[in-house]
Image (spheres, helix red, strand yellow):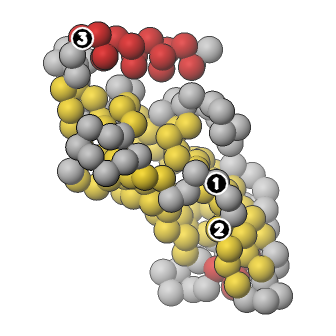
Amino acid sequence: MFTLTERLTISGAASDTFATIDLGSYVDVGDRQALQVHSVDFIFQGTTASEALTTAVGADSSIDIQLTDLNRGGLVFCNDRALVASGRLLVDFSNNSLTSESDLYPDNFGKGADDGRFVVNDQLYVTGRSSVLAGSKAINVTVRVNASIVSLNAKDFMAIAIQSTAADN
């Protein structure tokens, strides 16, 4: 198992911000290799690594983050087949507290070596949004994907590829 990371910097309030995680060197269609996602973590930080989130937002805020295996161009509903992981952090500025709202986060796909979400696409897409930001501040969200490379039999690989293609429509 290994960890892929990507940091997304949200610098505009109420607008989607995007980043990608390149999987081209991990997924091989010819050998029926896929990326098996075991868990996904989201780490929320302010403009700098040590700045409090309450300072970065400056008011009550909702920070949303999603990881998908298809580029949807924005946040998606939780029944979207492309959704791999999702999280929401509520910032209560007046009480100086943070609360994670009911969502898929933390995303843990099981404890065994056979458990996980299989991805056969060449990229993962990260989308983030903060409802409020203070002045010239930003929110940094680091996505940590714990994964491994697996070889699937032809039947399983085709089923995942067809599902992913169907989800693209």
Name the residue that disc number 1 marks.
103
Quarter occupied by residue 83: top right
Q: Position of residue 22 (x, y in %)?
A: 35, 40
Which residue corresponds to the image point at 36% horizontal and 40% vertical from the top-left?
116
Which residue corresponds to the image point at 57% horizontal and 28% vertical from the top-left?
81
Q: Is residue 126 left or right of residue 32?
A: right
- Along the polypeptide, which appears first: circle 3 or circle 1? 1
Which residue corresponds to the image point at 81% horizontal and 75% vertical from the top-left?
60
Q: Identify the image quadrant of the C terminus.
A: top right
Q: Position of residue 132 (x, y in %)?
A: 79, 68
* Whether residue 56 is visible: no
Q: Are marks 3 and 1 in contact (CB under 8 Å)?
A: no
Gap between marks 3 and 2, in whole Å?
40 Å
Q: From the viewer's side, name the closer residue of 2 and 52.
A: 2
Q: From the viewer's side, name the closer residue of 11 and 106.
A: 106
- Along the polypeptide, which appears first: circle 3 or circle 2? 2
Above or below 133: residue 51: below
Amino acid at the residue labelled 1? Asp
Q: Which structural element holds mark 2?
A: strand
Q: Are marks 1 and 2 in contact (CB under 8 Å)?
A: yes
Which residue corresponds to the image point at 51% horizontal and 59% vertical from the top-left?
106
Q: Which structural element holds mark 3?
A: helix
Above or below 43: residue 24: above
Name the residue that disc number 2 marks.
100
Amino acid at the residue labelled 2? Ser
Q: Which mark is residue 154?
A: 3
Q: Is residue 154 left or right of residue 132?
A: left
Q: Is residue 145 left or right of residue 129?
A: left
* Whether residue 132 is visible: yes
Q: Is residue 135 left or right of residue 37?
A: right
Amino acid at the residue labelled 3? Ala
The local crowd at label 2, few if under 14, some if 14 to 19, many if 20 or more residues have their Cα within 10 Å, is some
